[in-house]
Image (cartoon, rainbow, N blue to C red):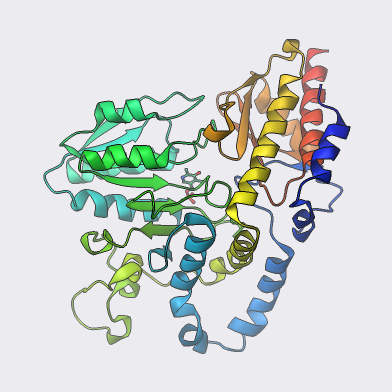
Amino acid sequence: MVSLESAERLDAVDPLRSFRARFVGSDDPDVVAYLDGNSLGRPLRASAERLARFAPEAWGSRLIRGWDEEWFDLPLTVGDRIARAALGAASGQVVIGDSTTVLLYKLIRAAVDARPGRTDIVVDTDNFPTDRYLVEGIAAERGLSLVWIESDIHSGVTAEQLAAVVGPNTALVLLSNVAYRSGYLADVPELTRITHDAGALALWDVCHSVGSVPMQLDEWQVDIAIGCTYKYLNGGPGSPAFVYVRREVQPVLRQPIQGWIGHADSFAMGPGFTPAEGMRGFLSGTPSIVGMQAMRDMVELVDEVGMDAIRTKSESLTGLAIDIVDGWSAELGVTLATPRDPQRRGSHVTIEHPHFREITARLWKRGVIPDFRAPQGMRLGLSPLSTSHIELWRGLEAVRDELERLAA
Ligand SMILES: *Cc1c(COP(=O)(O)O)cnc(C)c1O
């Protein structure tokens, strides 16, 4: 059994412990443990202040002048900050765009069109639903075939599995860096190399890794990466996603939603569409400036703290979660659905039990907030800067308590 004291000791030696107080709600007595920062990060206090100022100042007093003064370039400037803080990418390769789903659509379409004559999109059966649904639609639209890798729901896609299916017909490989269900961390450089050896493009969904797992997208030669900003970048519900496109690939990708903001000269308003060069060409319509406000503070904080320190804290939290669950009596019937090797997992831990659906609902009422993933998984999302070891310990103590009540 892992004691409360040992969780306290981990907090005492955690160099990032002071950052938790910077988040709104970190002192709310009704929230005992927030274990879902991987679905919706808590707001920073700085972001709450920024949002409060936004209506009277940037919007209310600069009015339409705001577009010239800052907003027109904001998708690119915030994109560059994310690239530097969290993606291991040089500037000029990231832009904040639409939702993850819409950006994935645009870039999958652009990627398959950039490999004419190749007929296959490789994807795995346990990829995030939106990714799977999109490729089904695009395959039908473009007359392409889907090649499914049967991934293990307790881990994820391996190099051997990918190598066995790619070939001269592969146009695109679409995979997730961190599996949304198991937390499995894919070997991006190795899988990207295998993809390139087959002459295909690699598109990585980095929704669950950006801000929690360090990436070196430039060094790894990733072609395209798309990620959420409302998870570990704390941009708030529905904040827009970002896309990274490696500089050398930008000129060969043409995205299908040709709107005026992606035009080479938006305000000429002339006939015919000429895409803007570089990342602006991946935009379509007016960007969500309101939606881009909160993430700015978190991206600065991530840059200040550094991804390596964030990763160390994340490993400490996920390791503690596994140690706590390992200490439970086998009679509780809980199993681990996340890789034990810290090198192979992201920042959430999934545990399984046939009654976790009901138990999760009861936990939410008592201020312990993990999430449930069918058929029987409870995900413990451990956002490194806003979660403490004690909070995690208390949350899991409540899970154990609910399981014991059920057994009684
Ligand atoms: C959260 C998540 C998404 C969400 O896409 P939206 O368009 O923002 O709803 C997509 N892919 C993965 C892997 C995710 O974790």
Residue 117 can be seen, yes or no = yes
**Residue 359: quadrant of the picture:** top right
- Say whether residue 170 is left or right of residue 302: left
Front in this rendered view, residue 75 or 144: 75
State the residue at coordinates (22%, 48%).
112
Tell me the quarter of the image containing the C terminus: top right
Tell which of 146 and 173 is nearer to you. 173
Q: Residue at x 24, y 61 (%)?
A: 254
Residue 403 percent coordinates (x, y): 77, 20
Question: x and y percent of residue 278 in the render?
Answer: 31, 69
Spot occupied by residue 238 in the image (x, y as percentages of width and height):
54, 57
User: Would you say 165 lies left or right of 232 here?
Assistant: left
Quadrant (top left/top right/bottom left/bottom right) for the N terminus: top right
Question: At which x and y percent is residue 396?
Answer: 77, 30
In front: 195, or 156?
A: 195
Task: From this view, report whether residue 139 is shown above or below residue 304.
Answer: above
Compared across the picture, whether 61 is left or right of 195 comes to: right
Image point (69%, 54%), residue name: 42
